[in-house]
Amino acid sequence: MIQTFNQLKKNLKKDLSLLPVIKIALLGDTATQFLSTALKGVGVEKGFNFDLFEADYNQVERQFLDTTSELFQFDPEYIIVFQSTHKLLSKFNTTSIEKQISVFNDRIAFIKTICSTTSTRIIYFNYPEIDDQVFGSYANKVENSFIYQIRRLNLELMNLSQQFPNLFICDISSIQNKLGRDFMFDSSVYVSTEMVLSIDTIPYIAYRTIDIISAAQGYFKKCLILDLDNTLWGGIIGDDGIENIQLGHELGIGKAFSEFQQWILKLKNRGIILAICSKNNESIAKEPFEKHPEMVLHLDDIAVFVANWENKADNIRKIQSILNIGFDSMVFIDDNPFERNLVRENIPNITVPELPEDPGEYLEYLYSLNLFETISYSNADLERTKQYQVESQRAALQFSFTNEKDFLKSLAMVSEVAPLNPFNIPRVAQLSQRSNQFNLRTVRYTEAEIEALAQNDQFQNITFTLSDKFGEHGLICVIILEKQNSDTLFINTWFMSCRVLKRGMENFTLNTIVNYAKKNGFKKILGEYIPTSKNGMVENHYIQLGFSPVENINHHLFELDVEHYMDKETYITIK
Amino acid sequence: MEKTAILSQIQEIFRDILDDDTLILQYETTAQDVEEWDSLTHIQLIVAIEKHFKIKFTSREILSWKNVEEMVESTFIKL
């Protein structure tokens, strides 16, 4: 899956004019030309055209500390900072013993400074270890050994990234753990170029960096679809029977499958939705989940379970229609190369990793792919599987009503309407990153930006939760209103989770907006639709809600007269 | 392996890295003669040659080469 440096370099010759431009800056204390080429090359592969500012060699401090520097004039969306272990070691080596620890303290202080100087997202590379072997293993007992301090620095970076919402650590130390130091560093490359990364390592670093940017741009995985036979357990349940499938912690290959399932369970607990797609009879396929004592995954971990004899591409489309998320946010894992190819060919954008033939190698191989990068994590993630399971129950109830109104009434929906507050800001930021389809302008906000909005009088923010008799959806809709002047409110942001489509939530939301406008003397509400490749479903959103188009160049602006607005029908009550 | 064979294989590597299928390498060719052969591409070429022939050059060798012939010579000795 990973392209070589030379392939990445050739990507730059392709026509990039149709790709969205993202401005990024790269600052390093070693030669970064190859890294910048690789970053652009990976960008092309992922569908971004990076406008990249590369600071002159070894200017990290100057660029940040001088507010008139080229960096700030360039005004990037992401700043990538690569301060190398190698250079830090040189500094350490040339500092007197009593001041050596302060080399690290200064570095930590500097990182704090840059995170507070700018609200731009900073992607900071952590420090792959170099063990200078001055103390051997005894270095672990010696506070001013280099290895002790470099580990402390990496720990401190993690702490700082929790403290500063705009700081993201790119874990290149973990890349070195995977690839090995001798692969990562090439002395002849270093001697002739001042580059501390080997050419073969650079793509790994570039992909890892772009994974963070992609996630921040809203492209990340939400769902893992799994095959069963020889993927979750060894053998074929239909042929071998429940007693003979290989699973469990005794000797043999069974433990590889158990450990694979443990990993999957951790992903589920992190908020990845699990689905099963297997060629089997449903009752036989479910039997191990219900009865096998060594199964780590149980039926209540699975949001959608599809086992039949139809082709897997059709079944994945079925799973997609239930979950209502994009194919590009799905990963499909199957041991059978035929099924993998069939799914790849028929479902564009879905991620289908290769899988080693030996199940014992599944995990280490998948670890190398970094499939589930994210830029946020909140309590809502933990509840996700339950919500999708409840969604299947709702779908079943809806079937029993012929009349949509009766169905909506029967749900007994309640919404809590609240301004931004410290409790909902993380979820608001997360939803802002995740919402692609029901998102009118697709402006992405970080936690830091949402916090700033909450303090800004020019904006009025409204959040909505929804619950019904089956359970809680949590916070599902966010409105950010911009007070353009004393008469006009502009809907800067309207996004909603697709989980609550077709519940009349749009009507309820608009009633709430107009109500606010009336109370505060606004005469007009303006809404804008900015098309993306994903938000076609809300193209006519404002027209359907009774807005009229405003004559302008792009034809995506709509207005609503506040005075003559009649409340829309809704079956949602305010909590 | 004959030096001419090494030269022609190195030429293939140059063509791939410099993305130029018409490039012709001669023993006396130097970096000045090839437009895209700068100090950064140089290191890329070396790593590709090392990989192709499964050899490893020393830093000193890399810095000492004046033309393609010396590059071929260093490779030849190691095979």
Image (tube, helix red, strand yellow):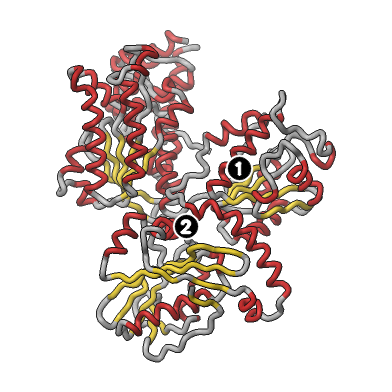
- Residue A199: image quadrant is top left
Relative image position of residue A474 (x, y in whole percent): 51, 62
Relative image position of residue A149 (x, y in whole percent): 31, 25
A221 sits to left or right of A376:
right
Establish if A89 lies above or below A159: above
Neighbour tally class for label 1: few under 14, some 14-19, many 20 plus, Cα within 10 Å = some
- Under mark 1, the amino acid is Leu
Q: Which residue is mark 1?
A: A265
Furthest-top residue in this view = B77
- How far is the residue under mark 1 from the one under mark 2? 22 Å
Q: Which residue is mark 2?
A: A434
A69 sits to left or right of A83:
left
Q: Residue at x 37, y 16 (%)?
A: B71
A158 sits to left or right of A88:
right
The chain ID associated with circle 1 is A
Badge 2 marks a residue whose secondary structure is: helix
- Residue A183: image quadrant is top left
In the image, A315 versus A522, the foreground residue is A522
In the image, A459 versus A46, the foreground residue is A459
- Under mark 2, the amino acid is Arg
Badge 1 marks a residue whose secondary structure is: helix
A201 sits to left or right of A405:
left
